Image: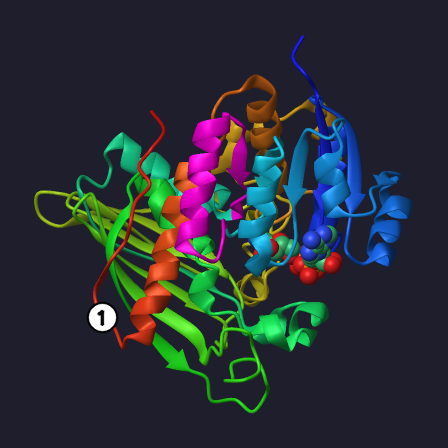
């Protein structure tokens, strides 16, 4: 009998509340604890989810009955939190991104190699329908050789939760320090990695205090960052991270994906697949296959496009392209919540199954590095007005 998981969720903020019930209900998890720097937050979780609290992260690391950490601390803290967990012999599930420094990503990969522990980055977007569709069709050969694609994560700072905006020292984080929603969609679809990047920043011009020198801890003035990434497979991707943009949804998507034999285009709720023919192209509207079922159910209504643009039906409903993945979920997840294009349940099942069995998880440390490091280098390129920079690669597990 393998050792079951005892998980301590660190960071009882906005996001972790979606995941505590999923850890609790997973058949490989025997117990869930929570902890937060702010005791009132841990107490709120205790009441809400009927879990025990641990007073501090340091205590969680010392406890021999805790064998896994689920990290939901603020995005710029992940490198140190994860490093310490691995050094203490704990498996790690971490919200994105992997870390904010290249060296921290490399160290996490080395620690995973050395210890054999499970590390998984919970990148929701690998299960987003547009990415899954491109991955499936690319593997089938429908696009031929990949030549060019566009992926992006657009999330206006005004749409972020109040507590995120209230912390002015960290709300103005450089957009490419949180790069994985856009990079992972493309790279997961293609099974490749970035070798070189050029990037430009948009210097923010609004009167509020997020993207200003002397306000945020990075002295960052860019609210949007745009890049071209050279890929190891010979293709090129345009990858953007924007936080000041009058656009709400789909907030994270592959907008286009072009190959020598076919292509894909997506906007609002319309997904189109083109294929090269002797005299032109074939065109298939694949929207019903890619959109969530709840969205498709409303497609004939007059305000459909507007409701999609305002983020409706993008939480819990599965789409047909996710069906194969959905089938492997445990029975105990049936009536539980989900989120982010129905990705939450799949991610927690990925991690628990991997940590329990010892198999590699879906977004293991090497892939997490491949999805995070290009963004960190892209920010350096933006600071150098678009200098072309090499992107270090940690390779793949042997
Ligand atoms: N789609 C996605 O993948 C997605 C969506 C939302 C958030 N996230 C990620 O989830 C993470 C959490 O986001 P959030 O909005 O819940 O943040 P939050 O600020 O609401 O919560 C973070 C919590 O971590 C606690 N914390 C920080 N350091 C700690 C420590 N050393 N010990 C104990 N507690 C500590 C803070 O006190 C805070 O309560 C972020 O990294 C964010 O990037 C990912």
Q: Position of residue 203 (x, y in %)?
A: 41, 83
| As drawn, 25 above or below 185 | above
Q: Residue at x 42, y 64 (%)?
A: 176
Count how many numbered circles sit on residues in the image.
1
**In this view of the protein, can residue 46 be seen by the observer?**
yes
Magenta segment: 98-124
Ligand 1 within 8 Å of disc 1? The answer is no
Q: Position of residue 88 (x, y in %)?
A: 63, 35
Locate residue 275 relative to residue 75 in the image: left or right.
left
| As drawn, 30 above or below 187 | above
Q: Residue at x 35, y 49 (%)?
A: 186
The N terminus lies in quadrant: top right
Q: Which residue is mark 1?
A: 387
| As drawn, 360 above or below 18 | above
Label 1 element class? loop
Q: Position of residue 50 (x, y in %)?
A: 89, 39
Between 127 and 351, the residue placed more toward the observer is 351
Q: Residue at x 67, y 73 (%)?
A: 167
Residue 261, magenta (yes or no): no
The C terminus lies in quadrant: top left
């Amino acid at each position: 009998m393998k050792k079951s998981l005892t998980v301590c969720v660190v960071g009882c903020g906005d996001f972790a509340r979606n995941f505590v019930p999923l850890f609790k209900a997973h058949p490989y998890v025997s117990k869930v604890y929570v902890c937060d720097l702010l005791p009132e937050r841990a107490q709120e979780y205790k009441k809400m989810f009927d879990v025990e609290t641990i007073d501090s992260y340091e205590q969680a690391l010392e406890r021999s009955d805790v064998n896994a950490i689920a990290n939901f601390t603020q995005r710029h803290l992940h490198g140190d939190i994860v490093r310490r967990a691995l050094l203490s012999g704990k498996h790690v599930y971490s919200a994105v991104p992997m870390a904010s420094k290249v060296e921290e990503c490399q160290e996490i990969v080395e620690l995973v190699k050395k210890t054999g522990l499970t590390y998984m980055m919970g990148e929701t977007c690998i299960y987003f329908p547009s990415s899954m569709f491109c991955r499936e069709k690319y593997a089938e050969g429908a696009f031929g050789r990949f030549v060019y694609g566009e992926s992006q994560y657009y999330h206006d700072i005004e749409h972020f939760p109040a507590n995120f905006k209230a912390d002015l020292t960290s709300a103005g984080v450089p957009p490419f320090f949180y790069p994985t929603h856009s990079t992972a969609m493309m790279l997961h679809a293609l099974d490749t990695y970035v070798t070189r990047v050029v990037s430009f920043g948009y210097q923010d011009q609004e009167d509020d205090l997020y993207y200003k020198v002397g306000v945020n801890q990075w002295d960052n003035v860019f609210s949007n960052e745009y890049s071209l990434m050279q890929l190891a497979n010979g293709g090129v991707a345009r990858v953007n991270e924007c936080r000041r943009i009058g656009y709400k949804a789909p907030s994270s998507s592959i907008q286009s994906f072009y190959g020598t034999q076919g292509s894909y285009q997506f906007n609002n709720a319309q997904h189109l697949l083109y294929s090269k023919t002797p005299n032109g192209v074939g065109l298939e509207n694949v929207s019903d296959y890619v959109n969530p079922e709840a969205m498709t159910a409303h497609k004939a209504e007059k305000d459909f496009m507007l409701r999609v643009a305002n983020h409706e039906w993008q939480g819990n409903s599965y789409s047909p392209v996710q069906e194969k993945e959905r089938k492997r979920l445990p029975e105990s997840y049936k009536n539980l919540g989900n989120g982010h294009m129905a990705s939450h349940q799949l991610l927690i099942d990925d991690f628990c199954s991997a940590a329990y069995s010892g198999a590699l998880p879906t977004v293991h440390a090497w892939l997490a590095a491949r999805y995070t490091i290009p963004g960190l280098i892209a920010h350096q390129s933006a600071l150098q007005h678009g200098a072309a920079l090499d992107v270090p690669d940690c390779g793949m597990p042997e």
